[in-house]
Amino acid sequence: AQYANALVALGVKPGDRVALQVEKSLEAVFAYLGTVRAGAVFLPLNTAYTPAEIGYFLGDAEPVLFACDPAQAGTLAPVAREAGVRHLLTLDGEGRGSLAKAADAAAETFADVPRGSDDLAALLYTSGTTGRSKGAMLTHGNLASNAQALADIWRFSPDDVLIHALPIFHTHGLFVAINVTLVAGASMVFLPKFDPELILTLLARATVLMGVPTFYTRLLKSPGLTPEACAHMRLFIAGSAPLLAETHREWKAKTGHAILERYGMTETGMITSNPYEGERRAGTVGFPLPEVSVRVADPENGRELIAGAIGMIEVKGPNVFKGYWRMPEKTASEFRDGWFVTGDLGLIDERGYVHIVGRGKDLVITGGYNVYPKEIESEIDALDGVVESAVIGLPHADFGEGVTAVVVARSDAGLDEKAVIGALEGRLARYKLPKRVIFVDDLPRNTMGKVQKNILREQYKGMYGA
Ligand code: AMP
């Protein structure tokens, strides 16, 4: 209420945007809630964005107010001024700054500005690996329906204690984690960042963990991860990037818990989830949420495909966003007959579980054949000594694209290019075999744990001299 009052006092009106690029703090969560209570639109920005990138977002979204870290205020003041932002305030990782001061001085009650389910609550920019990042317009209806659906299917209750170690500028940490906790009247242990050792000590008083797959692979490295350490826990949830089936199995073996994997995106909130009761199938993202419809369609003509066939995942429901901010044409082009085209390729198996095989733009087309990177990655990952892999297509004079594997191997594995290709021969059709195998120490990942194939494609683009 104090944040809502402070924003209104600064002239924030219903529908105005309120932008924040701040470290994680509870006060930042108050700023989010104050913004929506005041009827305004919350715009969180990744802390990794540079001043030039911030300039683009401020210019595009035209917020009335922008809050940043006090240490950045000197650099960002001219950027905000240039974009026409009326108020620049500050908030640091401890929740201190001019925004917090304004809120502290404000009254403690606030009458919510009435909003309809179609009114905007937030503007979240997509990570934008192709072209300019787009602002996804999310409504009160989108957020409320998703939070309620997830709280129901994941059986949240006021007794739950969620370990919150995700960033809060992204849909996962901001909406899935926080809104579900709030709607259920549950509690959170709110951590500034992911720290595996600290999380292990918190498991004894928490009930749920939500994480990106890297949380789980890193926790698995700790000897402290035992069934006893997890005895108080009710649920482990993963999403935002694919969880390896191997991680799922190892986690089960070490803790007795089957990780529940779900799937979603900025534009749609959560789309599918493995079941709370019933089999949580490794390598799948489960079933559509209540009231959400998912279909797999032919990417070319939009015809719905039969069970088991790979195609474009499309979605419809109260979770689907209102469109891209000030991009009506882009918005129109991403919908087909009322279905939102996710850009993810996948299939629905005969039991109704949705499987993701990768981003459409990651599909490799070599000599006219479609190669789904995930199929090759799964084969490579199964080889002794391989930690993980990413398969990409690189410009190739003969084939259009050459299948290329980027592999992280254990140092004692003694693997080389020939050994990897040799092991795949006979297991995969010839056209699917990597033409080259590159060994690296780590795959490039963004903060949400997604492998950044665009960086790999850029780095190795001259490989075949095309
Ligand atoms: P973002 O908008 O940043 O949340 O990214 C959304 C994208 O992340 C989706 O379109 C998927 O490509 C990917 N993603 C999210 N959850 C999963 C999952 N469980 N398995 C595989 N990919 C996922």
Image (cartoon, rainbow, N blue to C red):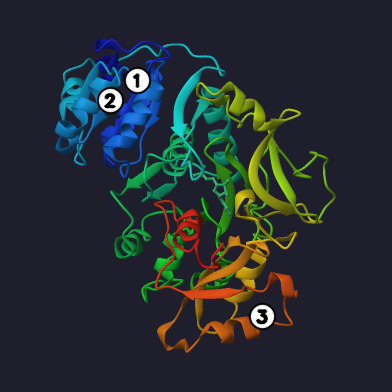
Looking at the picture, how far across and down is residue 45, in whole percent? 35, 36
Decide: marks 2, 3 in contact (CB < 8 A)? no
Looking at the picture, how far across and down is residue 431, in whole percent? 72, 70
Residue that appears at 51% across and 67% down: 463
- The kind of residue on which mark 2 rests is Phe
Q: Residues within 10 Å of mark 2 (few under 14, many from 20)?
A: many
Q: Which residue is mark 3?
A: 424
Label drawn at residue 63: 1
Task: Say if 94 sits above or below 356 in the image.
Answer: above
Residue that appears at 61% across and 74% down: 435
Q: Report whether residue 193 is seen.
A: yes
User: Residue 344 or 101: which is nearer the viewer?
Assistant: 344
Q: Report whether residue 234 is seen.
A: no
Mark 3: secondary structure: helix
Task: Say if 155 sits above or below 309 in the image.
Answer: above
Decide: marks 3, 1 in contact (CB < 8 A)? no
The C terminus: image quadrant: bottom right
**Distance between mark 3 and mark 1 Cα atoms:** 53 Å
User: Residue 443 or 254: which is nearer the viewer?
Assistant: 443
Q: Which residue is mark 2?
A: 66
Whichever of callouts 3 and 1 sits on the residue coming sooner in the sequence is 1
Residue that appears at 37% across and 73% down: 222
Foreground disc of the pair 3, 1: 3
Whichever of callouts 2 and 3 sits on the residue coming sooner in the sequence is 2
Q: Residues within 10 Å of mark 3 (few under 14, many from 20)?
A: some
**Distance between mark 2 and mark 1 Cα atoms:** 7 Å
Decide: marks 2, 1 in contact (CB < 8 A)? yes
Image position of 281 (left or right of 205):
right
Residue at the right extreme of this rendering: 306
